[in-house]
Image (tube, rainbow, N blue to C red):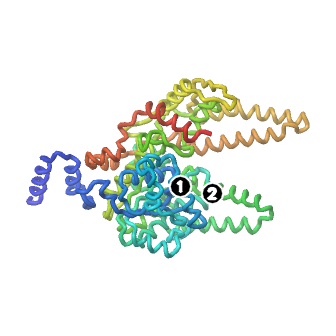
Amino acid sequence: MSSVIKHKSVLCSLALLDDSSLFLEVFFFFFSGQKKIYNMAVGVVDFLKNKNILVIGGTGFLGKVFLEKILRVQPDVGQIFTLVRAKDFQSAKSKIQKEIICSELFRLVQELYRGEYEKFMAQKIVPVVGDVSIDDDLGIEAEHRNEICSKVDIVVNLAATTKFYERYDVSMGVNGVGAINTINFCKKCPNLLILIHVSTAYVNVGRTGIIAEETVKMAIDGLTMGPSEIKRECGLITKTLEEMRSTAHAEDSLKHKAETKRMKELGEERARNFGWPNVYVFTKAIGEMMVEQMRGDMPVVILRPTIIESTLAEPFPGWMEGNRMLDPLFIGYGKGRIQTFVAENNLIVDVIPVDMVANCMIASMYKHAKQSDLFIYQVATSVENPLFYDVGVDAAYKYFVSHPCTTKEGKMVEVKIPFILRSMESFQQYMKLYYKIPIEMLHFASLLLCGLQKERYRQLLHKYDTVMKLAMLYQPFIFFQGKFDNSNTNFLWKGLSKEDKQIFKFDVKRIDWTNYFYNIHIPGLLKYVSD
C-alpha cells in the first residue's frame, strides 16, 4: 500500500509540471517495467555531444541523411568512424570525399562552415577500411580496430543489400552474417551505450492484419533459426560454389555469369523454402533473429522502416538518391514509357520519408542508451496516416500534365490517365495480349525472313521475361494486406521534450500525401534521380 501511495504522490507532483513529456517518461519508468532512461535531464542534442559513433553503411541513402543530421545539429559530436568497403585507406577516403563531403545533401552544413567545411568534415568523419561480411572484426586492421573499440559509444548498423533478386552469398554475407559479426564486434567495445540495427518492416511481409512491433520468428524443421542454422546455410553456399567451380570449363566471364545466375536462384529457392518471397527480406529476417539471440544484455534497438523515400523537409525537401521501390514507375510514367499500373482497389502503400527515419534513429539511441533490453520500432505510416496507391498515381498524373517531361529532341511528353489493372491475373493477360503475342508474331516473321529479325526477337523476349520476373518478385509487396503498428514509435515521439520534437521530427500524422508527391517527391526524383 505504501508503495502505491508513494507512486501516486510522485504522479500528482509531476502533474503540476508544464512539460508533459517528462511526466510521461517518469510514469512509464514506474509502471511499464522499462529500465531507467539514460538521462532524462539531457536532451537529444546534448546527448550527442562528444559521442563517438561507428556507422556501418554510412555511404548509403539513409546513412548519409543520418550523418548529415547529426553533423548539422551537434557540431561537438565526437568522431564518426565510417566503415567503407575499399582496397586501402586512400580509396576509402576518396569514397567519403565523393559520396559524402561533396554530396548536395550536405550543402547546409557547408554553408554553416564555409571555408572551414572540409576541415570540419575531416575532423568528424573518419574513414575505416572494412567489410561487415568478413569476420567479427568487420575486416578492420588490428591497430584501427583496437582504437575504435576503445573509443566507440554507439554502433549503427545500416549495412544492407536490398536487391530482391540478389546472389545468395552476397545477401547472406551482408544481411545475415553481417549482423552476427556486428554483434560480436560490439561485445569488444567496453564503453558501448547502444547498438542500432536497421532492418525493414517487410521481414513480416507474409503476414496480414496489424503487424506488431515484435521479434520475428521462423521455424526450420521444428527448430528456431540460430547460428548453427546460419552456418548450415553458409555451408550450402560454399558447397554449391565449389561444385560449380570444379566442373566449369568455360571462359572466366561466362563462368562468372553462370555462377551469379545459380547464386541468385539458390537465394530465391532458400527464401521461398522458409516462407519469404525473396532473398532480401529473408536475410534481413535472419539478421534480426541473430541480433536478438546473440546480444546477451547488450542495449539494442531494432529499427524497421517501411519503403523509404525522399526527404520531407530536412535538410531540404525532395532529396533523393537511387531508384527506390516506387520510383521507376513514376519516372517511367512521366517519360511516356509506362501507362499501366497494377494495384488492388484501396491498396495502402507504406511509405516513409527518409529524414523521419533518421530522426527516429537518433531519438531511439538517446532514449535507450545503457538499457539492457531489446526495443523494436516500426517507422511506418499504414496505421496512422495510410497512403492509398491511387493518391500517388493521381498526384503523378496531375504533376506530369502541369510539368511535362521532354524527349531528347525537346518534344513534350503527353501523359494519359493511367490504366490500373486490379489483379495479377489481369496484368498477366494484359502482358500476353499486348506484348507476348506480338513478340511471337515477330518470331514467326523472322523465320519467314530467314532470321533477319532473330536478334530483335531475342531482345524483346528477354525484356518481356525480365518484366514478368520483376512482377513476380514485387507481387507480395504490391498486394500486401498487412499494416504496420507503430505504437512504440508513437510512444518514443510523445516522450520527447518540446525542444527535441522541434529538431527531430518523425510524427507521421503531419504528412500530407498529395502535397508530398506533387510538390516534393516527384520534383525531387526528376532533379536527383531521373536518367
Q: Which mark is residue 74?
A: none
Q: Quadrant of residue 414?
A: top right
- Amino acid type at mark 2: Arg
**Res. 288 in view:** no
In which image quadrant can residue 420 be found? top right
441 over 323 or under it: above or below? above
Q: Does dot 1 land on a helix, a strand or a loop?
A: helix
Q: Earlier in the sequence, mark 2 or mark 1?
A: 2
Q: Is residue 329 left or right of residue 503?
A: right
Q: For the N terminus, give its image quadrant.
A: bottom left
Q: What is the crowding at mark 2: few (fewer than 14 residues within 10 Å), some, or many (at least 20)?
A: many
In the picture of the structure, the residue carrying the numbered disc 2 is 167
Task: Find residue 485 and report its image quarter.
Answer: top left
Residue 295 location, x and y as percent? 40, 66
Q: 218 and 381: which one is in front?
A: 381
Residue 509 at x, y percent in the picture:
35, 38
Q: CA distance from mark 2 to mark 1?
A: 13 Å
Residue 56 position in % (x across, y down) = 48, 60
Within 10 Å of the Cα at label 1, are there few (<14), some (14-19), or many (20+) other Cα atoms? many
Residue 523 placement (x, y as % from top left): 52, 34
Q: Nearer the viewer, residue 247 or 112?
A: 112
Q: Quarter of the image containing the C terminus?
A: top right
- Residue type at mark 1: give it: Phe
Residue occupied by mark 1: 282
